[in-house]
Image: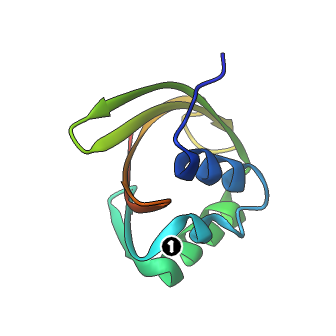
Amino acid sequence: MTLNLPKPIADYFEADRGSGESVEKCFVSDAVVRDERKTYHGVNEIRAWRAEVAAKFTYTCQPLAMQQQDDRTVVTCRLEGNFPGSPVNLRFFFKLSGDKIQDLEVIP
């Protein structure tokens, strides 16, 4: 099944599929990411977050479903890889600002 994701979100998942080095380009400069009980502010911290994940784990992320909740787009994904608890479904809560991501929260 292919989802018709908004372009900034599709760009995020495409960047994440590769080396992940360009993930931060999907975000506005003052974006916020919350993942695993940590908060990352701005593209420099987001770049470091993604580099840390890439250094520790190899995984695939398959978007399965999408819905709107107020001003957020929620994408449910299946992650499989070499991390504890794999496979797992995660929900990605995106808030967009124009053609970029303003806010991302990842919740199991």
Q: Is residue 67 above or below residue 48?
A: above
Horizontal and vertical percent for residue 47?
58, 75
Q: Is residue 94 above or below residue 89?
A: below
The outermost residue toward the top is: 1
Give the secondary structure at mark 1.
Answer: helix
Q: Quadrant of residue 22?
A: bottom right
Using the rendered image of the protein, determine whether residue 22 is visible from the camera's viewpoint: yes
The residue lying toward the viewer, choosing from 79 and 93, is: 93
The outermost residue toward the front is: 98
Residue drawn 46% across the image and 35% down it: 90
Residue drawn 61% across the image and 70% down it: 25
The outermost residue toward the left is: 70
User: What residue is shown with label 1?
Assistant: 46
The residue lying toward the viewer, choosing from 9 and 90, is: 9
Residue drawn 50% across the image and 59% down it: 99
Task: Answer left or right for 17 relative to 74.
Answer: right
Q: Is residue 27 above or below residue 57?
A: below
Task: Answer left or right for 81 relative to 96.
Answer: right
Quarter the C terminus occupies: top left
